[in-house]
Amino acid sequence: MTFDRRDLFKTGAAAAVVALLGEGCTSAAPVQGATLGFTAVPASLADAVAVPPEYQQQVLYPWGSPTGIAGSMPAFAPDASNSAADQAVQAGMHHDGMHFFAMGQDRGLLVMNHEYTDEQLLHTDGASPWTADKTRKSLHAMGVSVIEVERSSGGWRQVLPSRYARRIHGNTPMRIAGPAAGTPRMRTAANPAGDQVFGTFANCAMGVTPWGTYLTCEENFHAYFGGPKEAAVRATEAQRRYGTVPGSSWSEYWRFEERFDLTKHPNEPHRFGWVVEIDPFDPESTPVKRTALGRKHQESATCTLTKDGRVAVYMGDDSEFEYIYKFVSRDKVTPGTDAAARAANREVLDHGTLYVARFDTGGRGRWLELVHGRNALEAPNGFADPADVVVHARMAGDLVGATKMDRPEWIAVHPQTGEVYVTLTGNTDRGKAGKPAVDAANPRANNRFGGILRWREDGGDAASASFAWNHFVLAGDPKLPDAGVRYPRPDDDAFGNPDGLHIDSGGLLWIQTDMAGPRMGKGSHAALGNNTMLCADPATGRIKRFLTGPSGCEITGCVVTPDRRTLFVNIQHPGEVRVNGMPNSAWPDGKLPGSARPRSATLAVQRRDGGIVGT
Ligand code: FEO
Ligand code: CA
Ligand code: CA
Ligand code: CA
């Protein structure tokens, strides 16, 4: 038995969704109050942000803005001449996952990831020649920002300076905790104890713990490790699986900072690919890598409580044919979000059970334990100890028979129903020769558009070992007859390649897209415009386009304030697409491409009448 459908489908509209989507996990509770009353925004290829006419938008904290650290607030240099030291106290590039930690009604901490770097834009003379200084600046342009913001009649503004302001980046000292800490795989020449590391980078999606700390996820960390191309022939199976193969890096870090040379320091990449916990309220605190949650191309660490008061963390691994994971803590969470609660819960994420998802036919699924000594996770199969299981979680997932997914990205939990939504952003290799075929959960070969899948844990308990699932949407242009597109309703706005997800406290589902730059406005994606954000009501299946982004950008990172009157959204990498070598956007500083260096930034979006967003 899973959950009682009679309690769930009280309206005709919801019943229609049931009919469309069939059995299994079917719909969320109705959203509180009126929903989706805003004017839908049309798909657009303009180099601008569009929101409904009854909304207003403000740009906050574009790349290079001072973070607000007292005595150290260098201004942004539009020619990218800021030094590596400047960049360490300024907004990083490529804003991604984000949360608003409220401090009263009109003030709070905005904590956000800086995912990766565009070296052409980051340095005055671009990426060549590459230098040691560029390596440092690049490392400083990733990581996490903590900024303080406040609202007045004029809207939101950044508090400068702020005692909370902090930049955590690719050289910030941090601690390693959990089952892999101190084990041989984590030891390096610089840290023989295997319990400390410099930095976090490739920070993509995120999570928030019940005790009020921020979780940042290390996604494409592999791209910063390199080495001589000839050494690729010696790469191990594990290195290939994680992408840490000499000759395939996105950067030349390894030529100037030895720890990034895979042939000299093969354990250094084991210290990345984790969920990192940060206390945003204590600028002196040391970030901690929580190895109990498993190592992967980490995307999302979405927390919810189990029925008996432990924490469950849902995680995606964003690569083709990778898995969805769940961690359930051993210990109960001490309630509260004050300093005492944060201290009391400081080891909760170090002890527990890691699971990986298997999606079966008939809308059923199981969580398979990744525990050393069980499910064949033993020495003869390459897992000598618990550290091996978490460091090589992907291979542990293979052994237990997890379901290979179409690139799981963000995960969101419905606050009223506990229903869990995950974006599967796409997988054009699905069904190709030598690659996995379609399956129940990943039903489209050459999946160009991605979709959103959802599940409900049996017994309504996040600690359950089994669940019911179905698809909320198989995205894409419904006018393409062979694309297998399926929306909950015929009047839904179309989109492609969902990635960011946020469910606000009222139960509205915010969907953000990451169509690849070369696809936007072209071919199968021609009708979908630039990347976009939509708002959905899970109870009725209605999906409406709320915001469209500037040229070349991705929309990612989203949080609605507790009073539901402000939506913070990140605009990542405007201008990533180059036309004749020139970024195709000058957002937000310029009108015409080429007139200004495009910059990732945060938007504060509010209704002009001060009402609740999305309703
Ligand atoms: Fe950084 Fe998978 O998105
Ligand atoms: Ca993403
Ligand atoms: Ca993506
Ligand atoms: Ca992107």
Image (tube, rainbow, N blue to C red):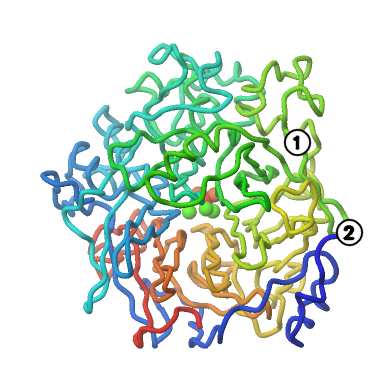
Q: Identify the residue position indicated by label 2 in the image.
A: 362
In the rendered structure, the answer to whether residue 496 lies left or right of residue 86 reads: right
Q: Nearer the viewer, residue 32 or 445?
A: 32
Label 2: how many Cα within 10 Å (few below 14, some 14–19, many 20+): few
Residue 234 vs 463, above or below: the answer is above
In the rendered structure, the answer to whether residue 129 lies left or right of residue 570 reads: left
Give amino acid for label 2.
Gly
In the rendered image, residue 451, in percent from the top left (x then y), is placed at 67, 63
Q: Is residue 206 visible?
A: no
Q: Nearer the viewer, residue 354 or 411?
A: 354
Label 1: how many Cα within 10 Å (few below 14, some 14–19, many 20+): many
> Which numbered disc, 1 or 2, marks the residue closer to the eye?
1
Q: Nearer the viewer, residue 321 or 314?
A: 314
Q: Nearer the viewer, residue 262 or 184?
A: 184
- Report whether the residue tagged 1 is closer than 8 Å to ligand 1: no
Q: Residue at the location (18% across, 51% down)?
A: 79
Hey, which quadrant is residue 549 in on the image? Answer: bottom left
Question: Which image quadrant: the N terminus?
Answer: bottom right
Q: Residue at the location (50% across, 49% down)?
A: 209
Residue 29 vs 393, above or below: the answer is below
| Inter-mark Cα distance, 1 to 2 | 22 Å
In the rendered structure, the answer to whether residue 36 lies left or right of residue 170 reads: right
Which residue reaches farthest left? 71
Q: Identify the residue position indicated by label 1 in the image.
A: 369
In the rendered image, residue 201, in percent from the top left (x then y), is placed at 41, 38
SS of the residue under disc 1:
strand
Tell me whether circle 1 and circle 2 mark residues in contact (CB < 8 Å): no
In the rendered structure, the answer to whether residue 200 lies left or right of residue 128 reads: right
SS of the residue under disc 2:
helix
Give amino acid for label 1.
Glu
Q: Residue at the location (59% across, 36% down)?
A: 293
